[in-house]
Amino acid sequence: MESRRVDTGTHPIQAVPRFLNPRLLLHRILIGRIVVAVAALIWAGWMFSSQPGVAFLLALVVLLAGTMSAYAGHAVWVRKVEPGTVFFGVQAAVDLILVLALVHYGQGASTALASLFVVLIAGYALLMPGTGGGVVTLVALLLYLLDRTLVETGVEIPILLGQLAVFAFVFLMVSVLSRRLQVAATEQSKLKHELQRIRLEADEILRSIRTGVMTVDGHGRLAFMNPTAERLLELNGERLLGRPVLDSLKARAPDLHAAMVAGLDEQDRVTRGEGLVHRADGTSFPIGLSTTTFERQLESLPAVTAIFTDISDSIHIQELRSRAERLEAVAALSASLAHEIRNPLASIRSSVEQLARSVQADDDDRTLGQLIVRESDRLSRLLSEFLDFSRVSVHDFSRVNLYAVAVQAVTLVREHPDCGAGVVVRVAGDQVHLDADEDLLHRIVTNLVLNAVQACEGKGEVLVTIDQPSPAALPIGSDIHSPVRLQIQDDGPGIEPDLRERLFQPFVSGRAGGSGLGLAIVQRAVEAHRGLVLLESTPGRGTTFTIFFHATWRTEEPA
C-alpha cells in the first residue's frame, strides 16, 4: 500500500496500525486535553477567591484549549480536512501551554503535574514521529527547564536533570517503537494488498479460462465453482455454494462424480481421465478431467478439486485428421484406378462410335451406341473428378487476398444455372491476406458457395464472411497460429445428422446426381494448407462451413 501524502506541507500519513492512526490518536489527545482543561477550570474556580489573577489566567488557558479543541474536531471530522504537520504543531502548542500553566501554578503539586509532560511527549511522539515529535519534546524540555530554574527557587538540579532525562527517554523509546510499528504495519499492508492482488488475479484467471474448476470439501459441499464449470455442468454455483453437491453432480456427470468421490473417500487422484456430461436437453458431450486431493486449514477431512474441459473439439479435430489420412489413401487409389480405366474406356467409346456409324448398323444399333457413348462420357467426367481429387496439392504458394478470391468465386457462382434470381449471395468481412495457393482457395470457395446455393433450391441467402478471429475462437486442440477465418453460411434446409457425419467422405453426397467428391476435395484442399474445416448444421435452420487458415505459412511446414 503506497503512503498517502498531502500536498500542503503537511505530515505524510502512512499505513499504520489502528492504534497509531493519526485521526484516532488526535481524537484521544483532544479527549485528554478536555479532561485536563475541565479539571483546570474546576481548580481555577476553587482558587478564585484566594488568587483571582491566577484563576483568571487559568480560565483563559482553558478557554484557548477548548476553542482549539472545537476547531480541531470541526476541521477533522466535519470538514474532513486531512491533518498535517502544521495542524499537529498548533495543537501541540496549545497542549504545551495548558500543561505548563498547570505545572507553573501547581504549587506543591507541580512535580506530580510534571508527569503530564511525559504523557504529552509520548502522545505527540506517536502522532508526529521523527522531527515533529522531536521539536515538541525539545520545546517541552526547554519550557519545563525555564519554569523550574527561573521561576522557582531551591530547585534540586539532579532531580531536575533526572526529570528532563525521563522526558527525553520517553520520546526516544516511543519514537523508536512507533517507527518500528509503522514499518511493520507498512510491510504487513503491502503483503496484504499483494495477497489480495494475487487472489484477484487468480480469481480472474479462474473465471476467464475455458476449463472448469470445481472444489468439494470433505463433507461433499461445494467450496468453489468457476463460471466455466457452471456452464458445462449447468449448475448454479452461487446457489449451491456451501451445500451438498455430489447428488446433483452424479446426475449430470457420473464419471466426474465417481472421480471426486474416490478422492474424498480414498484420496485417489485422477490424471487425464475422460467422461461424459449429460445436458438437460438429453444430449451429452465428452470431457477430459483430472482431480487432486489436498488438506484444507481448519478442516479435518480432505477436499477435492476437479479440473475438466469439454474435449468435443479435440475429439473432432482428431477425427478430422483421421479423415484426412483416409482421404489421402482414397486419393491414391482413385488416381490409380482413373489411369487404369481411362485408356480402356477411351478405346471402348471410340469403337462403339465407329460401329454406330457403320453402314450395317440399324436404328437399334445406333440408339445403343449413343447410349454407350453418353455413359462413357459421364464415366469419363467422373474419372476426371477422381483425378482432381487425387491431385489436390499446393503448387503456387503466394500472398493472396482472400476477400478478392471470395468475390471472384461468388461472381462465377452467380452465373451458374443453379443460382436463380431468388438466391442472394453476399460477401462481407475484411481485406485479409494469407499465404496460400490461389487456385486451391478459389476451388474451396467455389465448391462451398455452389453447394450452399444448390441447397437453397432457388430461394434463400448465402453469406460469405472473411475475418481474423481471436485465438479464443479456435477449437480447443487446434495448432493454427494467426488464424484467418472463411465462413460460408446459408439458410437452406440444413443437413440431417446421419448424413452430416459422413459428408466429407468420398462418394457421399446430399444432392441427387452429385458425385460426392466436392466436399472431399474441399477437405483435401484445406488440409493441404494445414487448415481446419468445421461444419455446423441444424435441419430447418441452414448450414455453416467454417474454415481456419494460417495467415502466414511457417517455413518449417512443407507446401
Image (cartoon, helix red, strand yellow):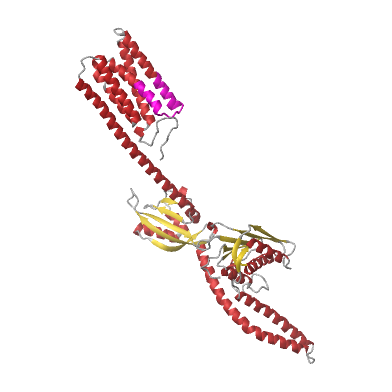
Tell me the magenta residue range: 67-95
Which residue ends up furthest to the bottom in the rendered image? 360
The secondary structure making up most of the magenta span is helix
Task: Give x and y (percent) for residue 118.
Answer: 28, 25
Which quadrant: the C terminus?
bottom right
Which quadrant: the N terminus?
top left
Q: Is residue 375 left or right of residue 470?
A: right
Q: Is residue 343 left or right of residue 248?
A: right
Task: Give x and y (percent) for residue 21.
Answer: 37, 32
Residue pictured at 50% horizontal, 65% vertical: 315
Task: Reply above or below: 170 against 376.
Answer: above
Residue pictured at 41% horizontal, 48% vertical: 198
The quarter of the displayed image where residue 105 is located: top left
Task: Reply above or below: 343 against 206.
Answer: below
Task: Give x and y (percent) for residue 370.
Answer: 75, 83
Q: Nearer the viewer, residue 268 or 490?
A: 490
Task: Reply above or below: 117 against 535.
Answer: above
In the image, residue 75 lies in the stretch drawn in magenta: yes
Does residue 492 appear anywhere in the picture?
Answer: no
Task: Give x and y (percent) for residue 48.
Answer: 31, 9
Residue pictured at 41% horizontal, 24% vertical: 72
In the image, residue 400 lies in the stretch drawn in magenta: no
Residue pictured at 38% horizontal, 52% vertical: 217
Does residue 526 appear anywhere in the picture?
Answer: yes
